[in-house]
Amino acid sequence: MSLLPRLIPCLDIRAGKVVKGRRFSGLREVGDPVALAEGYARDGADELVLLDVSATEEERTASLELLAMIRERIAIPMTVGGGIRCIDDALRLVESGADKISVNTAAVEQPGLLTRLADELGTQCVVVAIDARRIDGTACVCIRSGTLCTDRPAAAWAAEAVQRGAGEVLLTAWDRDGMQGGYDIELLREVANTVNAPLIASGGAAGPRDLLAAWSAGAQGALIASILHDGVWTIRKLKEQAIREGMEIRRCS
Amino acid sequence: MKVALVPTGRSNLRSVEAALRRCGASPFRCSDPAVVRNAELVAIPGVGSFAAGMSGLFSLGLDTALRQRALDHRPLLGICLGFQLFCQQSEESPGVSGMGIVNARLERFTGQVAVPQMGWNTVSGSGGLVADGCAYFANSYRLRQPPMGWNGSTAFHGERFVAALESGPMLLCQFHPELSGDYGAELLLRWLKEASA
């Protein structure tokens, strides 16, 4: 017995609302962040990821207040990301209640940032978020909300990021985001075999089967969004099903 | 119930404050050694390295105040690094002395496990304040077994390790009760009750 697999709802937040799209675009509003966060936590979520997908500075300041409100109410870990460019951005989030901060574009553009963040906050606080898009079969890193593709293989970047100071890898398959067709299991297996840090699967969850597949591919955590927001599944039902399938997970009271 | 929160470097105080408030307590941030020495209840959260944590305490004279408190068995809650700083030493920061209240040296997890340990693990409770259940951990270093004089709780991550130590109103948690859902909230309530009795 060791660490239990984690089920992690992800809230993409824009202008004070939770939004969700497909392949990072066509965002539609799905609800109030505080109410959703509280509801998911109560229902048995093991952790929350909050991603600020705001366009403006004003929205970002408002997101800090929102984060503090959510922090006041929930007693599970929160990873917060979106638009972090420097140490001060990260510190503001930690001060407002983030337990871990997630860096994506800025980590690719200035890889030294991961090391500085780890020195300042400890590796357990630093998550590298990687968006991977398959180009001719190879999963390559893409940045700036998936709009700019690089030619770096995701697994190689994950290994470098961990070496530089990331304590966790949040791996999103861009092609599968919001599509509800299952995670990119092959990619998860590849990255899990490359890095020794905890790995979170993201992009494509449709039901319990996908969670089990991600966990058995070596991911410690499974991110879910669309199926929860749309009410297709609840966390409680997902967990009950996973337990029936023989998974050992944190039971909700 | 007022709880003095001792800052150790870049700790996420907000999560601990929120958790204590949900338990009906009134946390306040405090780095004045005299207040920390005499406050009714004291909590030491903490993330970051052993060396940075100790130098933060030392620079404000808080190590002496906390050490005195512990020697007097006054109510104390240490969380994660806030627990580790009470040990003698850590493999993380060779040559740096901790407060030495817990007679043990921290070492890095060994074996084929992900380090840092990040996530929910199953705790075998002490039979005291710490119950059986699931708690949230985020650590790379650990004590292998409870030292003499402490009532220990354990968990397993490639090997058995110390999840918490208790002695009267002193509770040292390797895990994060403030992030451990209802399990953690119930533990905080029990500690508050025990510590203010």
Image (cartoon, coloured by chain):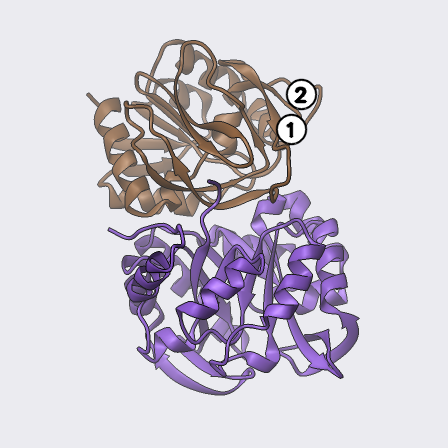
Chain colours: A purple, B brown
Residue assigned mark 1: B51
Q: Chain of mark 1?
A: B
Left or right relative to A157: residue B131: left
Vertical comparison of A206 with A3: above or below: below
The crowding category of the residue bearing disc 1, from other C-alpha atoms within 10 Å (few below 14, some 14 to 19, many at least 20), is: some
Left or right relative to B8: residue A8: left
Front residue (pair A245, A168): A245
Q: Which residue is located at x 62 percent, y 26 percent? A: B107
Q: CA distance from mark 2 to mark 1?
A: 6 Å
Q: Which residue is located at x 55 percent, y 82 percent? A: A24
The image quadrant of residue B17 is top left
Across and down, in percent, residue B174 comes to 46, 32
Residues beneath discs 2 and 1 located on the same chain: yes
The mark found on residue B96 in the picture is: 2
The crowding category of the residue bearing disc 2, from other C-alpha atoms within 10 Å (few below 14, some 14 to 19, many at least 20), is: some
Q: Which residue is located at x 54 percent, y 31 percent? A: B159
Q: Which residue is located at x 22 percent, y 41 percent? A: B24
Give the mark nearer the N terminus: 2 vs 1. Answer: 1
Q: Amino acid at mark 2?
A: Val
Asked which secondary structure carries label 2, the reply is: loop
Across and down, in percent, residue A228 comes to 36, 73
Left or right relative to B155: residue B38: left
